Amino acid sequence: MAGKKASVDMNEQNDAIEVTDANFGELLVQSLEEALAIERGEAEAPRRVRRVATIRDAKVQPPRGYDARAVQVIRERLGLSQAVFARVLNSSPETVKAWEQGKRVPDGIALALLQVADEHPEALMSRVGKKREASR
């Protein structure tokens, strides 16, 4: 590394450490000591989060709207009662009933969950199972 400098990104805040011939050995020893401390459980490994998209570069399509008939069609296609469908959506049976009767319109997170139920039903149906029979 004679005379060369390298910049090493050490964490998410983009704090860079400048590596030079003069500090290379010290940084290497420091890194090895940190690795040993992590291995012995005396320190936690730094957490790196790799972001695929941020608000600056991602365009997220809003969920589409669902009217009363569409909600009922999704539920019936899944073969669920209103009560079970409500539990799958973490909603109340009264809310599902109101949607299906057109008294209320799904909004917010409910629209996203309905879209998942519509397009990827297996994602929600994996939560539904049979109750065990009571032992006699």
Image (spheres, helix red, strand yellow):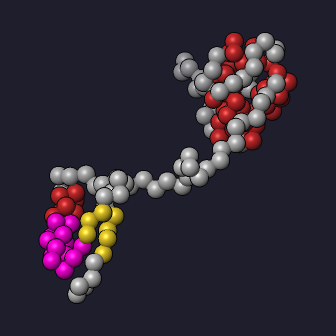
> What's the residue at 49%, 53% (across, down)?
51
User: Which image quarter holds the N terminus?
Assistant: bottom left
Residue numbers of the magenta segment: 19-31
Q: In the rendered image, is residue 130 in sight? A: no
| Res 35 quadrant in image | bottom left
Q: Quick one: quadrant of the C terminus?
A: top right
Q: Along the line of sight, which residue is nearer the eye, 131 or 52?
A: 52
> Image height check: is 81 above or below 74?
above
- Residue at 82% of width from left, 14% of height from top? 101
Residue 96 vertical position relative to residue 75 in the rendered view, above or below: above
- Residue 125 placement (x, y as % from top left): 67, 36
Q: Quadrant of residue 127?
A: top right
Point 65% across, 44% down: residue: 60
The prevailing secondary structure element of the residues shown in magenta is helix
**Viewed as shown, does residue 105 lie left or right of 13?**
right
Residue 62 percent location from the top left of the image: 70, 37
Q: Nearer the viewer, residue 129 or 68?
A: 68
Image location (x, y in percent) of residue 114: 71, 32
- The one of 4 and 90 positioned closer to us in this rendering: 4
What residue is rendered at 30% in x and 63% in y? 16
Residue 73: say if magenta. Answer: no
**Residue 7 visible, this angle:** yes
